Amino acid sequence: MLLNPLALHIPDGFLTPWICVLGWLCAVLVLHLAIRHSREQFGERQVPFMGVMAAFIFAAQAINFPVVGGTSGHILGGALTGILIGPWAGTLVMTAVIIVQGLLFQDGGMLSMGWNILNMGAFSVLTGYATYILLHRFLGTRKKVEPFVIFFAAWISVETGAVAVALQLAASGTFPLHLALPALTLVYGLIGLAEGLVTVAALSFIRGSYPELLQGNSAPGRASATLVSFGLAFALLLALLSPLASSSPDGLETVAETDGFMASASGSFFEVFPDYTVTMLESPSYSTIVAMVIGTLLVFGVVLMLGQLMMRVRGRAGAG
């Protein structure tokens, strides 16, 4: 069973060239801020958690689940990442996932990648984190309100991406806003319900097992190594389960097919692991599993190297 190749990733052809250029410019600016703030706020011991989060998000996004009316969805993980490791580091983690998805798996276009980084990465992480903080200021930090706060923050993070995509499609003349906005927000509003439940469950587990992570610190000694090992193993388990993903079209693809602008999507000019498959393997299930395992490990390694590089740069700046 092939994985769904579209999700909230915008393919090339949906947006005009100038809108794509604007997306890249905004993405570069946001990433510059994310790198600078992450370098100042993150410690070397916390870098492995960035890699684990990236591996988990990559693998979890491959597990599509049925939503309604022949549509499927998957979690984004933006709010979870932002709450757990901070908004700027979370933005970098999501960006690494989206870039690997685009370059190796042709998930989203190259020209539109700037907006994909913003929609699924920065906007999702920053709005989820901001909603979490603001709700706590208004409602307090009582344990009884915590699940509601987390759930709503995760739901908002998904809806933010949907609204942003609707605005970009409308600005490009691909799909009028009065149709795009209700269509996308309805579908992703339902997907956001699952996002909220998964985020509450994940943070509840972490709070019970590694509460120091939610206090902005890293787990000490063996606990740190155990959490990293467990997290990576769990991400690989999700990768092994990827053939079980729903084959129904995802939200953006459903809207595009229903409203007649799917034909404007253009294919990639190169293919590495198209549609999350290894073409040399005949079995679709094995092909998907191998591609997902490669992607999960690669994302983990990329974020690990990025984090270590930031620590080195900070060390040289401090020494200077």
Image: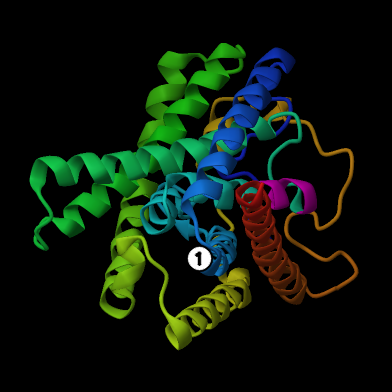
Vertically, is 266 above or below 281? above
Residue positioned 63% across, 34% down in the render: 10
Vertically, is 24 above or below 286? above
Element under disc 1: helix
Residue positioned 52% across, 59% down in the render: 64
The quadrant in which the N terminus is found is bottom right
Magenta stretch? Answer: 99-104
Front residue (pair 252, 46): 46
Front residue (pair 145, 290): 145
Residue positioned 11% across, 63% down in the render: 143
Predominant secondary structure, magenta span: helix
Vertically, is 190 above or below 53? above
Would you say 19 lies left or right of 207 here? right
Q: Mark 1 points at which residue?
A: 46
As shown in the figure, which amino acid type bears the numbered disc 1? Gln
In the rendered image, residue 101, in percent from the top left (x then y), is placed at 69, 51
Would you say 211 lies left or right of 298 here? left
